[in-house]
Image (spheres, grey):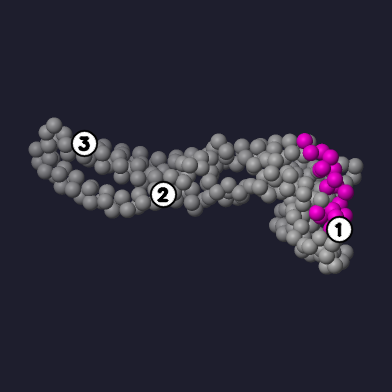
Amino acid sequence: MNNKSLVKLSNTIGIISIILLIYWVFVFISITVFGLKIFRENITETFYLSIVGILALMFGALIINVMFNLTRIAEKHNLDDINASKRMGKKQVLFVALSFPLVFSLLFGGDYFTTVKKEKMLIASAKSIIENNAAKTDQLLSYSFDEKWIIETADILALYSKTDEHFPYVSVIVADSIDISPVFLSFNDYYGVINDTILPQKKDFIQPTSKEERDYLNKVFYNNFAKVRFSASDGQYELFYPYIKSGHKIVLYFSDNQRYGKIGS
């Protein structure tokens, strides 16, 4: 292999490596800034380790410097290649510039499909848990703010959360009032001492909500609205699942925190 071939080979390998590294860093920044969920768990962990690629940029700069010096020597003996390389350079720069919006669109598309698939999976899992535990779910409908109901509810929810791996957190939301002010209370566990003289206080069970969530819960409890509500933000998936029977109403709240992202999740 002569010097001209070696220079072309080293240029090709170096340029391809630098371009791939630039795309790698671009994808990393896009996923981190926008909280996109794209890759499977093991790929995500490997991807985050690629931060060392930034150090490779410094090494790449040195290699490019050496390659350009070799190219200048080679071009003295191959003047016919100079004009062709200039013409191709503009097309390559344009192609690379246009490819970044395409990669960015693909990342957002992957995140969207991950969210859609997650929503369908959570709704199906919630429906399955409720239907397979109908008797216990009916117990939740007989809400009364007392220690006995809260403890029984905690036991039922513990069963739910252990039944399906996608629901590490499950709670029951009910409508109540404190000093004639309407509130939404959420129950997941009981941290008090059983049969203690200090009784549970409603204010300790108030469900923090956004305006959109309060509007939704008001429609469920006071307007017989029965549609589920799903939301996703930066790997946090939330599902409000109304359960209405014989005039009694509760909302089962399921959540799942996904630190990594994968289309096949």
Among the two numbered marks 3 and 1 on one chain, the one whose residue lies closer to the N terminus: 3
Neighbour tally class for label 3: few under 14, some 14-19, many 20 plus, Cα within 10 Å: few
Asked if residue 38 shows in the view, the reply is: no
Q: Is 206 in front, or is 111?
A: 206
Secondary-structure class at tag 1: loop
Judging by the rendered image, the residue that carries numbered circle 3 is 9
- Placement of 106 over or under 52, stated as above or below: above
Main SS, magenta residues = helix
Residue 104 is situated, as x and y percent measured from the top left of the image, at 47, 43
Viewer-proximal residue among 179 and 145? 145
- What residue did someone put label 1 on? 146
Which label was assigned to residue 49? Answer: 2
**Quadrant housing the C terminus:** top right
Earlier along the polypeptide chain: callout 3 or callout 2? 3
Q: Residues within 10 Å of mark 2 (few under 14, many from 20)?
A: few
Going from N to C along the chain, the mark reached first, 1 or 2, is 2
Name the amino acid, label 1: Asp
**How far apart, in angstroms, are the residues tagged by discs 3 and 2?**
29 Å
- Residue 96 falls left or right of residue 203: left
